[in-house]
Image (cartoon, rainbow, N blue to C red):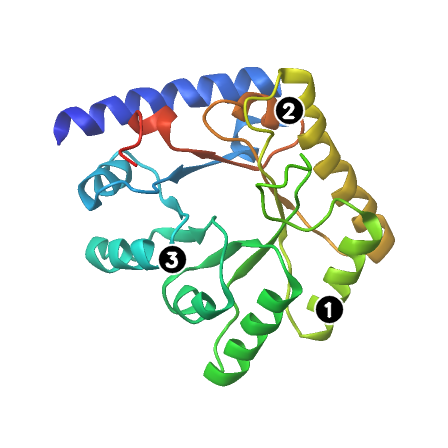
Amino acid sequence: MDDLVERIETRLEKAGEEIARALEGTGRDAGSVRIMAATKTRSVEEVRAVVDAGIRIIGENRVTEGGRKIRQLDCPDCEFHVIGPLHRKEVRQAFRDFDSIDSVDRVVILSEIARRVRMKKAPQPGILIEVNTSGESSKSGFEPDRGVLEEALGTADELGLKVNGFLTIGPLGGEESETREAFCLLRELRDWLVKSLGKRFPELSMGMSEDFTWAVAEGATTVRLGRYLLGPRNG
């Protein structure tokens, strides 16, 4: 376990250096970008090693798998995020176990979150709206259209929900120009919505192991690193 923690610490330091280089000339500093460990299919021991290496933001794609790990880890100062597609029936568990639902891709999910907030009389989790900026049919997310997103945010407002920002996934195997275009599109949509609605949406979660430096250069505030920190996944 000590060897794994050391390897993650080394990779984390390297990620920080790469982020700093990507930020050169942008007017932003390295502290403006958070690193989330994406731990889909990873064992509890691997996630514990990530925490021991200093990471406190954990992203899980699968609600049931993630919830089990969260209970076993028992890390009260960790921040757990849902970053994978969510079925309506899974909102109940996500609401119970996670601090933030970053992959809200349909209005029905917003409605179910609001219903849980009312039922439990509890604070809402963090919310990010997922946008399919690559246009790939295999990906979830709202259409990258100003009107569509403005309507979704209006619905969230009517439901009494606060949206913190947006999430996207770069095109699978995309070249740098294509990938950066997808990230740039999300930032431009966010900036337009800020002006249009007069609200702040500070969070842009974009960029994974293979493309996070491009995402940072285009405005990412959180990058989601899995293989970069832990090596190839088991499934």
Q: Which residue is mark 2?
A: 179
Q: Indicate the secondary structure of the residue bearing disc 1.
A: helix
Q: Earlier in the sequence, mark 3 or mark 1?
A: 3
Q: Is residue 75 visible?
A: no
Q: Check residue 155 in the rendering and tell me which mark sits there, or answer none.
A: 1
Are dots 3 and 1 in contact, CB under 8 Å? no
Q: Earlier in the sequence, mark 2 or mark 1?
A: 1
Q: Residues within 10 Å of mark 1 (few under 14, many from 20)?
A: some
Residue depicted at x 22% and y 42%:
43
User: Can you tell which quarter of the image residue 15 is in?
Assistant: top left
User: Which residue is outermost to the front?
Assistant: 137
Q: Position of residue 4 (x, y in %)?
A: 19, 27
Q: Amino acid at mark 3?
A: Val
Q: Indicate the secondary structure of the residue bearing disc 2.
A: helix
Judge depth for marks 3 and 1 and give the one in front.
Answer: 3
C-alpha span from label 2 to label 3: 28 Å
Looking at the image, residue 50 sits to the left or right of residue 31; the answer is left
Q: Which residue is mark 3?
A: 63
Looking at the image, residue 178 sits to the left or right of residue 188; the answer is left
Q: Position of residue 125 (x, y in %)?
A: 50, 64
**Quarter of the image containing the N terminus?**
top left
Q: Position of residue 191 (x, y in %)?
A: 78, 42
Residue depicted at x 46% and y 17%:
17
Are dots 2 and 1 in contact, CB under 8 Å? no
Q: Amino acid at mark 2?
A: Thr
Residue depicted at x 48% and y 22%:
210
**Quarter of the image containing the C terminus?**
top left
Q: Amino acid at mark 1?
A: Thr
